[in-house]
Amino acid sequence: MLKLKHILVEKSISLEGIRQRKNQGEASREELYIMRIKFWGTRGSIPVPGKDTTIYGGNTTCLEITLECGRTVIIDAGTGIRRLGEKLMKEKKNEDIHLLMTHIHWDHVFGFPFFNPIYDRSSKIYVDGNSNCFTGLKYTFDNKMGDGFFPIRFNDLRAKITYLEKMVNGLLDIDGTVIDSIPLHHPQGGLGFRFREGNKTLVFITDNELGGDAWEGRSPREYVKFCKDADILIHDSQYTPKEIDKRKGWGHSDYKAAFELAHNADVKKLILFHHDPPRIDEEVKAIELLCKELAKEKKSAMIIQAAKEGSKIDL
Ligand SMILES: [Zn+2]
Ligand SMILES: [Zn+2]
């Protein structure tokens, strides 16, 4: 501590300056890549901050996708979106944001009232995704009865927030990146997304019970078709095969089902996602290793990783 204080005084470095330079460094590296995925929240169900979740993260679902055209697409507004909002404001990237919502369970909308761009007049946010997504985001502030869940009302927000409503009936095209969707096996439904940019494909499917037959999801064959030849598949792997029997009907998958989907679809890289809240870092790591064992048994060259909060993947 003394040493740090000494450095700060010696070199006249302000705390503000440290953060600014770090952000500048990250921004200039981003320009080098075509499509970048950054995980701001990887956890399922509820945020779990603390010393046991520092590696894989404690924030709930939020991803930042930087498209080839430079536009920012956010998937879901879990608690991870708070820090992403701070970054977008600093980089002045709040004027043209797409927010895609898989569904509106708490862990996917929790962070929206803390997303700084919604309080800035220059922000333009285009919302799309599951049919009830816009209502769900509004209800994090207040509902029809005027009961407040938050001190500020949705109608008082300064940003221009528009519901595009394209994905309910088909594709969303953002400057040549085509995004289509597939229904999820999940209570109250939801959507998984597929991004196609040139010859690259990224598929994001969370909160999905593979093999489930309730709700309006799709058959195993249809999920395989949707993920076919994807460069990256990010899929719900909340449970282990041992746990899944007692969790049937909860709308989530085990890592073995996620691997089998990826294997049957010839996916190049599988990212295990929506970590179970009680899972400590060592356990998430063990799940990653067990899933790699499955790949070895099948003589598969697939790359397998457990999603880490703060990590980036270039595509
Ligand atoms: Zn969830
Ligand atoms: Zn859910």
Image (spheres, rainbow, N blue to C red):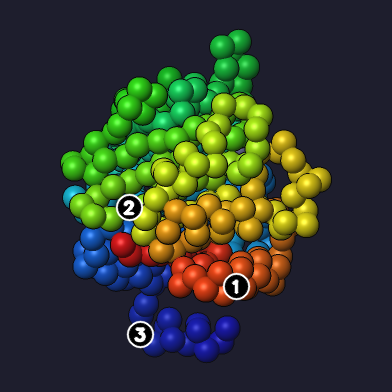
Q: What amino acid type should be assigned to the residue bearing mark 3?
A: Lys
Q: Secondary structure at mark 3?
A: loop
| Closer mark to the observer between disc 2 and disc 3 | 2
Q: Is residue 43 above or below residue 209?
A: below
Give the percent coordinates (x, y) of residue 65: 35, 51
Dot 1, crowdedness within 10 Å: few (<14), some or many (≥20)?
Answer: few
Q: Quadrant of the N terminus?
A: bottom right
Give the percent coordinates (x, y) of residue 28: 24, 67
Q: What amino acid type should be assigned to the residue bearing mark 2?
A: Thr
| Closer mark to the observer between disc 3 and disc 1 | 1
Q: Secondary structure at mark 2?
A: strand
Q: Which mark is residue 11?
A: 3
C-beta proximity under 8 Å, tags 3 and 1: no
Q: According to the image, label 2 marks what residue?
A: 201
Q: According to the image, label 1 marks what residue?
A: 297
Whether residue 70 is visible: no
Q: What amino acid type should be assigned to the residue bearing mark 1?
A: Glu
> Could you say which is closer to the camera, residue 217 or residue 221?
221
Dot 2, crowdedness within 10 Å: few (<14), some or many (≥20)?
Answer: many
Q: How far is disc 3 from disc 1 in space, using C-alphas?
A: 55 Å
> Could you say which is closer to the camera, residue 134 or residue 184?
184
Residue drawn where x is 81% and y is 45% of the image: 246
Instruction: Choose the circle earlier in sequence order: 2 or 1.
Output: 2
Q: Which mark is residue 9?
A: none
Q: Secondary structure at mark 1?
A: helix
Give the percent coordinates (x, y) of residue 17: 35, 69
Asked which quadrant contains residue 121, the reply is top left
C-beta proximity under 8 Å, tags 2 and 1: no
